[in-house]
Amino acid sequence: MCRHENISDKDYLVYLYMSETYRVFRDRLIDEKDRQKFSDMSHAIMEENMIMDWNLEDFTNTIFGTFESPDGQYIKLSESAELLPTLE
C-alpha cells in the first residue's frame, strides 16, 4: 500500500519492512518472551544482511497508516503521543 515515491531512503524502507513483519508475525505470538525472541532474531538478520547499525527499539513500535496523510497514502505515522489528537 505504500507508494514508491514515499520511500525516500533505505532507512524508511527498513521501517516499512519491519513494521509489516511485526504486524503480520510478531503481533500474533502468544507472550512477551516469544515476541522479544522474534525481535532479537529479526534484528540480527537485518544487521547481517542489510549491513546496518541500528537500535531495535527504534523499530519495535513503528506503525504505518493513512491517518496523517491528507490524500490517504500509507505512510510512517508519528509517535503515539503526537498521533492521539489526530485519532480522537
Image (tube, grey):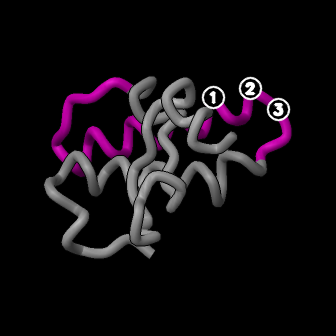
Quadrant (top left/top right/bottom left/bottom right) for the C terminus: top right
Tell me what residue is drawn at x 57 percent, y 42 percent.
Answer: 86
**Residue 87 in picture, x, y percent from top left:** 64, 44
Q: Are marks 2 and 3 in contact (CB under 8 Å)?
A: yes
Tell me what residue is drawn at x 46 percent, y 43 percent.
Answer: 42
For disc 2, the marked residue is 33
User: Type of residue at label 1?
Assistant: Gln
**Residue 35 in picture, x, y percent from top left:** 68, 35
User: Type of residue at label 3?
Assistant: Asp
Quadrant (top left/top right/bottom left/bottom right) for the N terminus: bottom left
- Rounded to the nearest whole Å, what is the CA distance between mark 2 and mark 3? 5 Å
Tell me if residue 52 is in the magenta stretch. yes
For disc 3, the marked residue is 31
Q: Is residue 18 above or below residue 62?
A: below
For disc 1, the marked residue is 36
- Say few, some or many: other residues with alpha carbon within 10 Å of mark 2 (under 14 / 14 to 19 / 20 or more): few
- Say few, some or many: other residues with alpha carbon within 10 Å of mark 3 (under 14 / 14 to 19 / 20 or more): few
Predominant secondary structure in magenta?
helix
Quarter occupied by residue 2: bottom left
Asked whether 54 or 61 is in front, the reply is: 61
Q: Is residue 27 above or below residue 13?
A: above
Tell me if residue 21 is in the magenta stretch. no
Left or right, residue 61 beside residue 11: right
Q: Pick whichever of labels 1 and 3 is earlier in the sequence.
A: 3
Asked whether 23 or 8 is in front, the reply is: 8
**Which portion, as a residue range, is magenta?**
29-55
User: Type of residue at label 2?
Assistant: Lys
